[in-house]
Amino acid sequence: MKKKWVVALLAAVMVLNTGCKGSEIPAAEPEQIEETPGPTEAPAEEPEETVNEEEAPADEAVTGGGSPWIDSDLKENISDGMALSLKDDFHLYQNYDWLKDAQFPDGYAQYGAFTQVALDTEAKATALLQDDTLTGHDAELVRSLYNAILDWDARDAAGVSPIQASVDDIRSLSSIEEISEFICDPERSYGVPCFMSFYNSTNINDSNSYILMIGGEGFLLGDAAEYSQRTEMGDLYYEAQLYLAQEMLPKVGYTKDEAKAMFDSVIDLETKLAEVSLTTADMMSPDYYDKINNIYKPDEAWALAPAFPGEKLINAFGFGKAKEIMVPEPEWVKRLNEIYMDDNLEQLKNYMVVKYVESMSPFLDSSSYDVYVNMSNMLSGSEGRVSDESMAFDLVRSALTTPMDRAYLERYDATEAKKRITEICKNVASAYRDILAEEEWLSEETRAAAIEKLDNLKINAVYPDKWEDYSKMDLTGLSYFECNKVISDFSMKKNVELTNGKVDKEIWGFDILEANAYYSAVDNSINIIVGLLGEPFYYDGMSDEELMGGIGMVIGHEISHAFDTSGAQFDKDGNYAFWWTEEDYMAFMERAQKLIDHYNTLTVWEGQNVLGDNVQTEAIADIGGMKAMLTLAKGKDSFDYDKFFTSYAHIWAFIRTRETELQRIMQDSHPLPYMRTNVTVQQYQEFYDTYDIKEGDGMYLAPEERVAVW
């Protein structure tokens, strides 16, 4: 299951930073099928033999040496005249023409079918945002923010003045007591990292209730593991973030040399915190929930860090009435307590200044935004930039999700799609019920509990029927920075009101315009949303096979997350509870370990293998989704398996920069796109029968080596 804290690579457009902000507990974060979305074309004809890629020159980054397939996500690995074989590399064969001809849009580090659907949605939403005739509160809100973002004259006139006073305030602090006074004043510290974040989130032990969670502010190097053993990814983060600091800090009164010293001071402080922090690998481990499920009474929580003003901080922001607090990383809190002292005064101030100024860079004047774009390109390997209109739309839907979604649905009706997707979801769930009923390795006790969980699966199709209330928000006449402040305060107030409260599961709480789909363990729901309903996933005139290879596979994937190594730890009501027999759970984990071991053998390029532990949940979901579709296919006359497998391969046609591919390998729970095709289809005999795959073919995997968990 994807954890919210795991997302480390800065995207082309950063979402609003709210300073002493909340960090939603990972279990409440819906599961995504793919993080950043993109198009496909017709397959190439099948020549007789496979291609042998040439080794990269010594002075270039290695991209070759993949086994058993080349990494065909990388544009540099695709060339004219490549010899292709369906039997040796199904993904490359089916997508070669598209992979060869596809180009990255400006500012994009990856492009594929998800991207194209997202761009279609963006085009329709942008037309809406630019329509001055639209009436209604939602339209007024999103249009006000959109126009404020694009008012470069006003932003350039303000320059960095919106943050200068806060930087000067931090510089003036002369004791740890003054730092405490500063961070505990919401007006003074707006936007500034206050060392500790806090947020009401769904309680994993009682999914009907909220609990206050406290945690850290994240790491400049993206992963706590990078501070003890720096990798190529860590070096990339270091250079990009240092560039941002050395370009931005001089704008607020520091020299480049001072910026470098301050940045390294922050890295040193983060190194101390990283020693006792969860790594990306920890967050992707099945025992993650055991590690974070630490519930304290407030006085017990603050006893972990008596030097840090934690209690005063949450009181200042309105969370002081919380009856219980979840502390995912108690040792991190204790380490913060050790650091929070006068001897480290300058280092603590550097931490606040550097991270504050860096986080605000995309929201200031055009020169600051230019620096931010350059930094983002360094991280992702992209070139150029997305259009200002695209940037503005992404920021609007991140900051004003509900008003943007409602305004979109007001213009583009999706009522019929909601009915159709709901029915498809029910059909796929029925197939999954057959899968569970036929699993020979399950005891009857566990089988009954699994089917009960499936029968209680909540289907959230296309859009919600209940929304959060934004009627009291007003952005009329405000600058972009002022809009940010109003939205931040509004969001914080809404979250404060949840303290000790009950969860309203009718409110989804995420962006339905994203080209994505989700499983949420804490309410046992699949979420198939309007933003993904485009070609090649779902469109008029699809054959059954194409629909099943597109949106059908997405739905099957999301249902499978209820039974992956993370989702399987939550019961039918979304509570973190054990519903297995011990024997069955051991068998389940043994099957998962076989999958992990298999992925560990796959080489992406020379010296870089897949990290099987990282991708286990998504791989289980991919393979489980395929089984659900093949189960449905058995009940259809004259089912065209070739059309189905081809349709599936097309949704995973992607091109990526090497930097983004590396980030995905190191920090993402999803297998690489070409493996999501090839490894998934390898698990099922229908694939072998359709294409006459035999031992010795590159796509062959012996029956005893196949790793389908379900």
Image: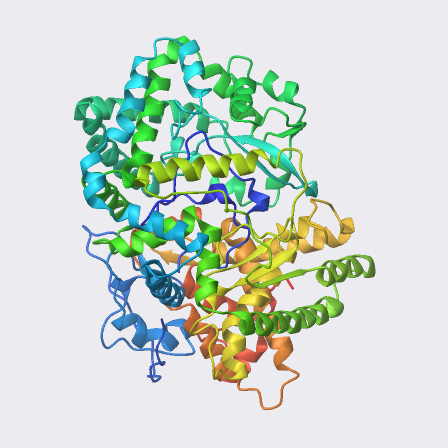
Q: Position of residue 651 (x, y in %)?
A: 43, 70
Instruction: Kindly indicate the quadrant of the structure image that contains residue 46.
Output: bottom left
Q: Position of residue 691 (x, y in %)?
A: 48, 83
Q: Quadrant of the C terminus?
A: bottom right
- The answer to whether residue 40 is left or right of residue 572 is left
Q: Determine if residue 413 is in view.
A: yes
Q: Residue at x 37, y 45 (%)?
A: 9
158 vs 629: above or below: above
Q: Residue at x 58, y 74 (%)?
A: 420
Q: Position of residue 449 (x, y in %)?
A: 78, 57
Instruction: Kindly indicate the quadrant of the structure image that contains residue 324.
Output: top right
527 vs 216: above or below: below
581 vs 21: above or below: below
Q: Nearer the viewer, residue 355 or 181?
A: 181
- The answer to whether residue 174 is left or right of residue 3 is left
Q: Position of residue 411 (x, y in %)?
A: 43, 66
| Residue lying at the far right of the rendered structure | 445
Q: Determine if residue 611 is in view.
A: no
